Amino acid sequence: MLPTVGDLLGLDVVRRGSPQVVAGSSGLGARVRWVHVLELADVAHLLQGGEFVLTTGIALPSEPTLLARYAADLAAAGVSALAVELGRRYVGALPDALVRAAAGCGLTLIAFEREVPFVDITEAVHARIIDAQLEELRASERLHEVFTELSVAGATPDEVVRQAATLAGRPVILADLAHRVLACEPGSADPTRLLAGFARRSRAVSAAGPSGAAGPSGAAGPSGAAGPSRPEQPGRPGRTAYDEASGWLFTPVGARGEDWGRVILVCDEPPTGTDTVLVERAATTLALGRLLTRHRESLDRQAHRTLITGIITQAHADPAEAAVRARALGVPVDDRQLIAVVFRLSDPLGPLGALGVSAHARVLDVADVAAAACRTERIPALVGTLDDARAGAMLSLSPQADPDRVLTSLATLIRERLGNDQDGLVIGVGAAAGSIRDVRRSFLEASQVADVAAGRPDIRERPLFYRLPDLRLRGLLHLLRDDPRLQTFVERELGALLARDQDTDLISVLAAYLAAGGNKAAAAKNSHLARPTFYQRLHRIERILGTDLSSAESRTSLHVALLALEAARAGEAVRG
């Protein structure tokens, strides 16, 4: 770590000059990057910040205004301190104008009451600075070796976090973007206290932003000059930052432009450059580990996705080519029951997965879990992603296998392994095909079934999977949603109501009434409306549509029209 101004004043070679701090004592904690001997009045343009400036004052101006400007220019340049030797230009004390100006602009001003060779000071301080930089380089190399070994060994996130905490000697936390703790190594800290109210504190840090960015060699000192051994990377503000209020040094974790978490080093003092290198290397190792874990299956998934897409789009001129490719991937297709399954996320941009990843990453997770479940159940299968909301699988079952039993066992296992990440997952199953030529039809059916099931109103218990017969009338209307005759029917039944933009809530009132089977009291309760208000809106609907809602035939016709309208809107959303 670079020395501070206070550290330099404690050196024997400096103490021989009897240094006295005459202004800016609050800046003694500023880091010193270098020592300069300058006998010029106009020196600010020669400085870069963090310098300890030595002078005899022989070139300084006499006018108080020029002395004040000299002090202000040094402070603006970010020097750590100005030390003036008495005896040559100034005898006994420094000019009041210089002292007042230094105090006013926060410049640490030191007077050497005795003569001291400046060369001795520069030699001693520079040796210390170089030693500190070499130690940081050695520490950085050690960190590089440790985390490289962890990456090569395929270490788990817990192992990476544990090693980082051991190296830092302080607690390290890995959290996702939803501020949930994925891994934590408290070290000697109390875990309960460390994690108490973590989500709230983490959100507060995210909302407020870092109180000070941590440069690779430590936090900025009171003079505003940081002591970096390597400059911060331009164009990447806030990637690694230090929040002084919480004592957190943190950096995001992710790759390919998608962050999925962050590593937090809990500090009891401002972090050093080594601390910054440590959290960044830990974050890189975690990101690489996640990519490598996914890559173990990625080649298989890519090959399967390409073949499935080719089957659906009929990219293979001869179905026999697709059959050959399937067999080459270890999936038999001759004399088998070939069943298409589509896994659809009904809300792909909704709740994030365990690591707060994107919609496409969630679909990849579903595909990986489905492939692993097929292996566990010993089911030959092609499994791959279809788009950002769907994954698909072609199951190859023997002629003697019971499809319902196989699908039930497989769907149960997949949902168990997904755990909380199965929220919003709908599984659609197509009809069994006897040859790969007919698998496309099975995939289209499974996709349509999944789309319709995903758009169904929430029900208490969804089945493990859906087939077309399970959707009944909704399934039929979904298949016919683009038929002009059905569209004409919807407009005839509901057009007058849809045209009234000022009464947009009337459609929901009608839907609640029809869903309740014509029970007005139950429908009003389900709509959270007072009965008189609900009844009044039903009368308005009857007037607008010119129909009698007490008629069972009218209610049936309107219910079919509403379901068809939902199917059409769902289809537009999927295409959009």
Image (cartoon, helix red, strand yellow):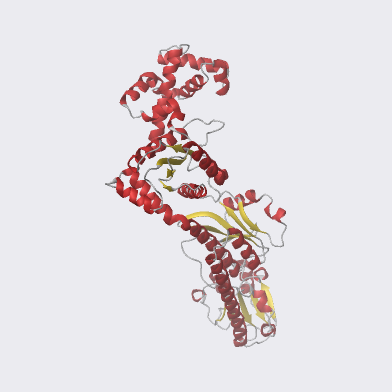
Residue 6: x percent and y percent?
A: 67, 74
- In what quadrant of the picture does the N terminus appear? bottom right
Q: Residue at x 37, y 51 (%)?
A: 327
Question: As displayed, is residue 295 above or below residue 27?
Answer: above
Q: Is residue 315 visible?
A: no
Q: Residue at x 32, y 23 (%)?
A: 485
Viewer-side residue, 65 vs 34: 34
Viewer-side residue, 346 vs 71: 346
Question: As displayed, is residue 431 above or below residue 241?
Answer: above
Viewer-side residue, 571 vs 34: 571
Residue 243: x percent and y percent?
A: 61, 58
- Would residue 234 appear left or right of 106 to someone viewing this image? left
- In what quadrant of the picture does the C terminus appear? top left
Residue 108: x percent and y percent?
A: 63, 72
Q: Is residue 181 visible?
A: yes
Residue 503: x percent and y percent?
A: 45, 22
Viewer-side residue, 151 vs 197: 151
